[in-house]
Image (cartoon, rainbow, N blue to C red):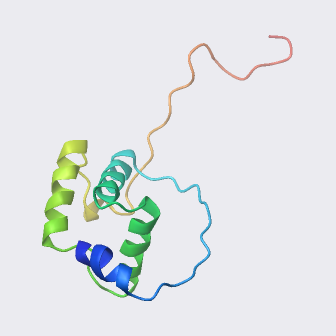
Amino acid sequence: MLVHWYIGTMIEAAAFVVERVQTGVRIEKRLLKVLKAFAEYHDMTLGDLLEGIVLHAFDGKAPFGPGSLNQIKDLKKFYGLELDSTASHRLKEAKRPEPSGRKGPKTRNS
């Protein structure tokens, strides 16, 4: 992501009025930590960051410049994120352990 686009020209450019909706998207835990840290560092919301990434991707443009990629590399290392684009569409969610004390469905006679 070319950060100067967000910090410099975004303020000066004409604003687009949009309607945003709340969503309950599930995302890999460490990936979310990296995204949130990157957004926080650049004083933007996670939603703004994701919208920027997606809009750049839809236009076939790279959302990140060399400086941002270096920062992301450092954040990935800090949060232990070893995934890259080769993992795309191949992530499988780990099974969650049963809550302690439960051994199966409760019945009326239990």
* Residue at the limit of the structure toward the front, as seen here: 12
| 76 and 82: which is toward the camera | 76
Q: Is residue 78 above or below residue 105?
A: below
Residue at the spot 48% in from the left edge and 37% down from the top edge: 95
Relative placement, left or right, of 8 versus 78 is right
Instruction: Report which quarter residue 39 is drawn in.
Output: bottom left
* Percent position of residue 82, x then y: 22, 50
Position of the C terminus by quadrant: top right
Residue 2 visible within the image? no
Snapshot quadrant of residue 43:
bottom left
Rendered view: 39 above or below 66: above
User: x, y (%) of residue 64?
Assistant: 24, 73
Above or below, comparing residue 53 to residue 89 in the picture: below
Residue 15 location (% of width, % of height): 48, 84
Residue 1: give x, y in percent of width and height. Answer: 26, 72
Could you tell me if residue 41 is visible in this image? yes
| Residue 95 horizontal side relative to residue 31, left or right | right
Q: Residue at x 81, y 18 (%)?
A: 107
